[in-house]
Image (cartoon, coloured by chain):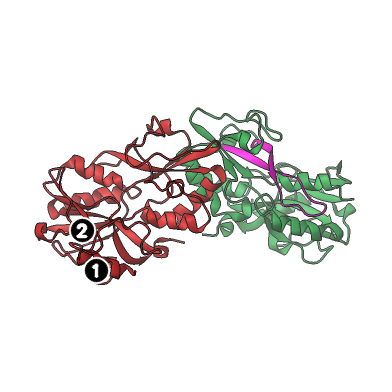
Chain colours: A green, B red
Amino acid sequence: MTPQELRLACRDGSFTTNTSGYCAGYVQANLVILPKSWADEFFVFAQQNPKPCPIIGFSKTPGEPVIRVGGKDVDIRSDLPQYRVWRDGELAGEPADVSDVWQDDFVTFLIGCSFSFEEALLADGLEIRNITEQVNVPMFNTNIACEPTERFYGNQVVSMRPFKAADAIRMIQICSRFPNVHGAPVHLGDPSLIGIEDIQKPDYGDAVTVNEGELPVFTACGVTPQAVIKQAKPPVCITHSPGCMLVTDIPNSKLAIF
Amino acid sequence: MTPQELRLACRDGSFTTNTSGYCAGYVQANLVILPKSWADEFFVFAQQNPKPCPIIGFSKTPGEPVIRVGGKDVDIRSDLPQYRVWRDGELAGEPADVSDVWQDDFVTFLIGCSFSFEEALLADGLEIRNITEQVNVPMFNTNIACEPTERFYGNQVVSMRPFKAADAIRMIQICSRFPNVHGAPVHLGDPSLIGIEDIQKPDYGDAVTVNEGELPVFTACGVTPQAVIKQAKPPVCITHSPGCMLVTDIPNSKLAIF
C-alpha cells in the first residue's frame, strides 16, 4: 500500500487501525489542530522546544484542510485512521473523521514521530527493545522544563530505549541526523537525574526489559505537546489517536540532515 | 607563532617543550616512523583500527623526510621538539633531532591527536576536566581488542573525560565530526564493562575528578599504536616524545567531515 492508498482507505473508512508498520520508508506524523487564536502561540512554543515538538509542516491559511506538505491530495479531516477531539482539555470523542467539527479558523501542525528514526536505527542493525518485545515504547514524565509561552508550559515527556554503550553512541549519531524527529537524545544513564523514579513504571506506554550492562537512553517525545495542550485547555483541539498517524508522501531519508 | 615558525624553532633547537596550547586552530599530529619492512603491515593495522590509529598523512616514498601533507617545508627529522627512538621495543633515547639515526627505508605516519577535538569541545562551551585541572588526560588499558595483523596486536588504550549526560551527548556529536582524531567515543558509563577496574587509577596520564551525576566517556587513544608497536618490537621505531607533537599547517576544521 502506498501512503496515498492508505490515506484514501482512511478517507473511505476501510482503514481504521494503528499505522505502525505500514508504508515503510515514509514519514508518519503526529497531528495537532488548534484554532488560530491558540495556534500562533503554539507555533512559538514549538519553535522554542524543537526537540519534543519538531514541526515538519503546517497549514499556512487557517481553515485550509488540504495539507500539501504531507503529500498528494491530503485532506487532514479524513486521511488519518482515527482522531481525538479535545474540548477544554478533556477528551470529547475519537471519531474516524473530523469534517463535522471542522472550523474555518483551524490551523494544522504536523509533528515528527519517532517511527522515522526507529527505521534508521533498525536499518543500521541496532535492536529496539520495544519492537523486539512488541509493546509500546515506555514514556516518562521528567523534570526537564519546556521553554514556556504564556499558556503553553510543562515538563518534557521522554521515550526510553535501552542500549549497550557502544550502541547508544551509534544511536546518538543516527538520531542526530534527524532533528525533525526529536533529534539526539536528551539524557542517558541514571534516570533519577531527570526525575524518573522507576524505569520499570512508565507514565505512558509499556515497560521494557533493561539488561545488565545497558544504559537507558531518553529521547524527547511527541507526547510532550499533547500534555502541554491538555494542560492549557484550549476550547477545542484535534489530535491523532495514539498510533494512528498521518502517513505522508515524504521519504524518511528526506528528514536526514546529512 | 605560526606552525611553520614553531617547526623552524624546533629545527634550530630553540623550542624544546610540550606543544600543547601552541598554534591554536592547527592540527597537531602523533608521529610514528618505521622501516618499510614494518611500515606496510602497520599501515594495514591502522586501516583496520581507524579509531585508535587514525592516519592523517604518511610518506609515500621510503626515506623521504619532507612530509608535504604536514605543511610547508616540514622536515620530519628535526621539526618536532623531542623524539623517542625505540630499539627492539625498548626506549633507546629522547633526542631533539633524529637526522643522525635516519634510514633510507623509513616511512613516516602522522596520526590524529585529541587536541583537535578538544579544541572543538571547548569552543562549544563544554568543560574538559583534564584541562580545568591542568593535568594530563587519564588513559586506561581496556579489554577491547584491536583487529590484529601478524605482528601488531593488543587491546585499545582509551582516554577518559567525564561529562554530564547532556554534555556527553553533545560531545559525541562533536567528536563524530572528527573521525581522523579518534572520532566518536567507544564507551561511556560503567568502566568495568571495558575492563577498567578503578577510574581513579589510570594506566597513563593523571586521574581527574568525576563528579556525582557525571558519566565517564571513553575515547580511543593514540597511545594504542605506541603500545602495539612496543609489543611488536621492531628493530627500530621513532615516535614523538609525549606531548611534543608535530604542529602542522592543517586547520583543525579541515578534519571535520561536516
* Residue B150 seen by the camera: no
Circle 1: element type: helix
In the rendered image, which residue does mark 1 sit on?
Answer: B8
Image location of residue A251, percent across then percent down: 59, 57
Chain letter behind tag 1: B
Instruction: Report which quarter residue B26 is drawn in.
Output: bottom left
Where does residue B72 sit, x and y in percent of width and height? 27, 72
Residue drawn at 67 percent across, 37 percent down: A139
In magenta, the rendered stretch is A137-161
Residue count near mark 1 (Cα–Cα under 10 Å), binned few <14, some 14–19, many ≥20: some
Query: Residue, x 35% and y 56% (percent of image)?
Result: B20
Question: Circle 2 is placed at which residue position?
Answer: B108
Q: Please report whichever mark, 2 or 1, sits nearer to the chain's N-terminal start.
A: 1
In the rendered image, the vertical position of residue A16 relative to residue B16, given as above or below: above
Q: Nearer the viewer, residue A15 or B251?
A: B251
Residue type at mark 1 is: Leu
